[in-house]
Image: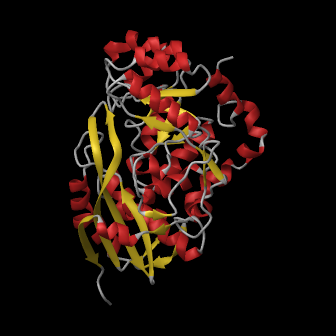
Amino acid sequence: MSIVRQMLQEGSCLSNPDLLSCPAMQARSEVVARPLELVSDPLAIERVEMRTVRLPLNEPFETSFGSIDSRLIFLVSIEADGRTGWGEVVAAEEPRYSYETVGTARHVIQDYLAPAMLSRPVAGLADLSACFASFRGHNMAKAGLELAFVDLLARAREQSLSQLIGGTRARVPVGVSLGIQPTLDELLARVERYLAYGYQRVKLKIKPGWDVEVVREVRRRHPNILLSVDANCAYTIADEKHLRVLDDFDLLMIEQPLDHDDLIDHARLQSIMTTPICLDESITGPARAKQALEMGSCRIINIKIGRVGGYSQALAIHDLCYSKGVPVWCGGMLESGIGRAHNIALASLAGFCLPGDISASSRYFAKDVIVPEVVVTADGAVEVPRGPGLGFEIDLNYITSNTVSIEQIEGSKK
């Protein structure tokens, strides 16, 4: 039996009628109902702050989109009743992964979302989602504010984010995402390094010309590790014969091989491949997730809370997949510790049964914006914080010292 098949069968998240009687599956009705519980007494938001912070990366990170050596972090915070909640907008500076950028998100929050949020008291997550519903798209901008609101709500209730959203795990398994390297030897050295750190899964970024032979050599050297690849839309259906060669390497998944908005060609490709396809960019909300599963476009879904529009949508996708026994995992967007803390909370939900891209803070940054920083244990897990809200302290001095821009939007005084 392959290591991937064995790993998946040992999990409690694959489609199997026998799972209906196990304790994890008996909790499904509670999980599906959870978003209705994220309500509060109407909360009048007093101020929204947008702040960009430039953090250098420890090393360049290259995907099929290109290479970056620093990250412009877009933080948002909201204030109400003497408390502050923190979120992060995961948009990049250029519209490569998504049409959203730091610039578009700033515009949409300042001119539309923040005024809507400040216009009346907000009575919970569903109410906030409804407040944003008339504005089409711009999921990353919406997510930043939703994250800040849920952090604020958790602090007000003196609960951790995980407790508030119904998380069941005290620690979450994590993997590492390794970008395209100048040479194969450099990639192999990084694989060795991060396996030594304890990461439970290695994901390789691939593109035409950096794929089959690279994966072949990593698998040859490490026949028993959990290994996956991520193409970030670098191929077309005309490459199906070439992509099928990846079936030889016992991969956990191939992530988003085709166009960012495609479901049809992914369904065709999945029908002829034994390796599970995981969709990332194509899944922009619960409706798209439902369509992808019904069409057979994938067997695994990557839930990025920023990509799908925040907790309201991420929880709905999780619950849909959990009800169908479809594995999900938490993807990353080179977030600071603030976004990473939200990812940890999301990954504590019962349906997240595959290692996520929740690396240690030191994977990307010499210093993070939270205290303590996120660390990975020797056995490849991250502890789920139990303190109120994020469960980490915000290093405001460090944030201030690296701030590029700051803007505040005030609510009306009554």
Quadrant of the rendered image containing residue 127:
bottom left
Q: Position of residue 200 (x, y in %)?
A: 59, 36
Any part of residue 298 in sight: no
Up-down: is 414 above or below 395?
below
In the displayed orientation, state which residue is furthest to the bottom.
414
Residue 270: where, in percent of width, then height? 47, 20
Number of dots carrying numbers: 0
Residue that appears at 31% across and 59% down: 74
- The quadrant in which the N terminus is found is top right
213 sits to left or right of 32: left
**Is 34 located above or below residue 182 in the figure?**
below
Q: Eyeballing the image, is 254 above or below 114? A: above
Identify the residue shown where x is 45% and y is 50%.
362
Q: In screen coordinates, is 241 left or right of 221? A: left
> Is 257 in front, or is 196?
196
Above or below, 153 against 87 in this view is: below
Pick whichever, 374 or 246, lies toward us. 374
Q: Position of residue 350 (x, y in %)?
A: 64, 47
